[in-house]
Image (cartoon, rainbow, N blue to C red):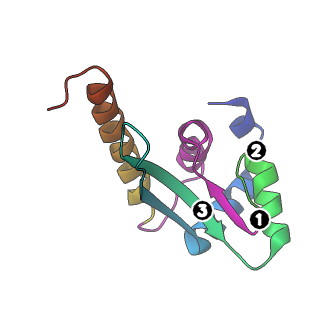
């Protein structure tokens, strides 16, 4: 487990999980790119939308990743795999959102297999 996760107090971790359970989402975006060899950019995303800037700034500070304040959003694959998914392993959802964590891992595996096949000429 990364040092960042080990340093998150349990009360903060479970609070963020509860907050993300109500206000967060996991999704995959598809964006067409005409000027690239791979025409579609497939991006797994975790985000939390909220009117209160302070709570999102605090979550960004605790998790040490994210790119905006009003919408806390993580699209960086490395941050998703090394910080976000392990965070929710340590502080798991109690709702059906726990299934999205497994779905996210499944999507990652598919994306990496397809990308590697494309790069190494195995894709038909």
Instruction: In the displayed orientation, state which residue is furthest to the top.
Output: 120
Disc on the earlier residue, 1 or 2: 1
Q: Which of the labelled discs sits on residue 15, or is there none?
A: none
The crowd level at tag 2 (other Cα within 10 Å; few <14, some 14-19, many 20+) is few
Residue at numbered disc 2: 64
- Residue identified by numbered label 3: 47
**Percent from the top left, x then y, of residue 46?**
55, 57
Mark 1, Cα crowd under 10 Å, few <14 / some 14-19 / many 20+, is many
CB within 8 Å, label 1 to label 2: no
Which circle's residue, 3 or 2, is located before the other in the chain? 3
The percent coordinates of residue 112 (x first, y second) are: 36, 33
The percent position of residue 61, horizontal first and vertical second, equals 82, 51
Q: Quadrant of residue 78?
A: top right
Between 17 and 49, the residue placed more toward the observer is: 49
Q: Which residue in the structure is indicated by mark 1? A: 56
- The residue shown at (69%, 39%) is 5
State the count of labels. 3
Residue range in magenta is 69-96
Q: Is residue 28 magenta?
A: no
Q: Position of residue 48 (x, y in %)?
A: 63, 67
* Disc 3, SS: strand
Q: CA distance from mark 3 to mark 2?
A: 14 Å
Name of the residue lying farthest toward the left: 124
Residue for point 39% across, 41% down: 108
């Amino acid at each position: 487990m990364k040092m960042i996760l080990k340093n998150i107090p349990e009360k903060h971790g479970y609070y963020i999980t509860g907050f993300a359970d109500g206000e967060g989402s996991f999704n995959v975006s598809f964006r067409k790119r005409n000027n690239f060899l791979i025409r579609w950019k497939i991006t797994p995303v975790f985000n939390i939308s909220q009117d209160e800037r302070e709570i999102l700034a605090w979550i960004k500070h605790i998790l040490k990743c994210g790119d905006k304040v009003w919408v806390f959003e993580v699209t960086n694959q490395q941050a998703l795999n090394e910080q976000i998914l392990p965070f929710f392993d340590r502080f798991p959802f109690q709702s059906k959102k726990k299934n999205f964590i497994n779905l996210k891992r499944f999507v990652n595996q598919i994306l990496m297999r397809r990308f590697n096949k494309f790069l190494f000429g195995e894709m038909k």
